[in-house]
Amino acid sequence: MTAALPVLIVLTSLVPACITFFLAQDSHTLRNGLNLCGAALKLGLIVWMLFAVAGGASYEATLTLAPGLVMLLRVDALALLFISLSATLWFLTTIYAIAYFGTKAELSRFFGFFSLCVAATTGLALSGSLISFFIFFELLTLSTWPLVAHKQDKPSMAAARAYLAYALPGSVALLWAIIWLESATGPVLFTDPPDLSALDPATLRAIFALFMIGLGVKAALVPLHGWLPAAMAAPAPVSALLHAVAVVKAGAFGVVRIIYDVFGAGTVLALGVGGPLALLASLTIIWGSLRALQQGEIKKRLAYSTVSQVSYIVLGAALASPLAMIGGLVHLIHQGLMKITLFFCAGIYDERAGVKTIAGLNGMGWRLPWTSVCFSLGAMGMIGLPPLAGFVSKFYLGLGGLEAGAPWVLGVLVASTLLNAAYFLPLLYRLWFLPADDTATGDERAPALVVPAVVTAAAAVGVGLLAASPISPLGWATLIVTREYGP
């Protein structure tokens, strides 16, 4: 049974995906029920395993694809951190997407790739070897491309082409790094870090750089970030999935795996590659915020905010100090909750009020109060106001910077916070303090759209207020660092 559980978790998304592709367009009840049941089952399994793994249990499934080629799925504390986020938000996004699309065309195709994307994300999180990680990493690329192109209009197709133009060279770099490393060390399992002594420092630095290029595309590190703002041509549920659950988080999660489970924090520091990566992450944090300031569309501003915010995770990993890593790991959850709230709200403004631009937000706080309160909480969390989730992440990253002997990190966090305020506070001012246009309309008579935003906004507040609890994301991130990456 313990060997079957990792496979079963993947199948809770993969089976609904495969069935959904063959359903008739008008099979709304069956399609919706199938995807909701799969999401609920996955969430239930993960909640059960969280308690088991916290108590020291482990689950592992191995499939030998060829001599020396092992597909390994393993449930560890780090994997559960990622898939608990993806499972929770997948369930809520499924509810949101069902209401968002209604009876529009091509929904069997959409929900098929939607569930396939989550299956790929789940497999990537559970991967216990480099080759397993690469297989699911590529499946994620292939399953998200049709979601970006879903509308099939010119902007969507252009965005999908841009995504592949970035993703495929990144995949080449990642595969090159894996082949180069494993040709010297043999198959790399995350539970058994490879012996790197056969490779000279210059070679290890080159391999590390290839890994960071391959993963940096999905993590949207500058200058590999251009595909992400373009992908905002996709529908709101896809934007929420890309920014909070799947692609960008897969890249950041991969950076953590490579630094801590392949090279090791000590080797990263000895090679001197952590510092340049931390500087690149810091550049991305500031650049993304500056670009966000220049955007007039709500989703574009949120997209550049993601470019900035996801690099907090990379920064925490690159600093290679325990407190910084806790800050980076907890931000993986916190950013997901805050950002999906913002994208849910952006979709509601568009669908229920026809508002796509920042100028159109004037007075919407009083026309769509639930949505606007949720948007305000998500924005204030991103700024880092206490006691919201974003404050906890930034606090630990700041402590981690001091612990790592890099006090300049505090300057990056302060600058980022000020820029966050500069591009979010004007939106909140428009929502609550400027009068609406006489022709403005809008209502919230769509509970299945509004409730997911309320739940994620409440969660973003709750994980900040209850950060000291051992079952909070901060408590789980601390458990990961002390149990798996401690001295």
Image (tube, rainbow, N blue to C red):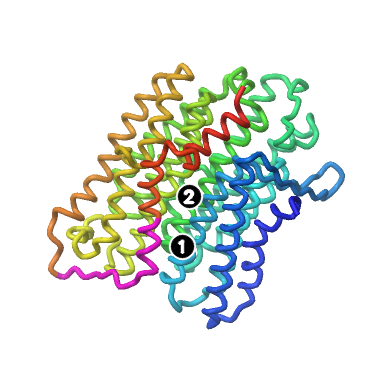
Residue 411: numbered disc: none
Q: Report the quarter where the C terminus lies.
A: top right
Q: Position of residue 444 (x, y in %)?
A: 29, 69
Q: Secondary structure at mark 2?
A: helix
Query: Residue at the right extreme?
Result: 67
Tell me if I can see residue 462 in this picture. Answer: yes
- Specify whether residue 222 is in view: no
Q: Position of residue 370 (x, y in %)?
A: 28, 61
Relative placement, left or right, of 401 versus 381 is: right
Q: Secondary structure at mark 1?
A: helix
Residue 291 forms part of the magenta stretch: no
**Mark 2, other Cα within 10 Å: few <14 / some 14–19 / many ≥20:** many
Q: Is residue 96 left or right of residue 218?
A: left
Quarter containing the N terminus = bottom right
Distance of label 1 from label 2 (alpha carbons)? 12 Å
**Magenta span has 453?**
yes
Residue at numbered disc 2: 227
Mark 1 surroundings: few (<14), some (14-19) or many (≥20) residues within 10 A: many
Identity of the residue drawn at 25% across and 55% down:
358
In the displayed structure image, the side of residue 425 where residue 481 appears, left or right: right
Range of residues picked out in magenta: 439-455
Counting residues from the start of the chain, the first of labels 1 and 2 encountered is 1
The three-letter amino acid code for the residue at tag 2 is: Trp
Q: Is residue 107 depicted above or below 374 in this figure? A: below
User: Label 1, on which residue?
Assistant: 156
Seen from the viewer's position, the closer of residues 282 and 444 is 444
Question: Residue drawn at (27%, 45%), measured in percent from left and top?
Answer: 424
Front residue (pair 210, 9) = 9
Give the number of marks.
2
Q: Disc 1 marks which amino acid?
A: Ser
Which quarter of the figure has residue 129?
top right
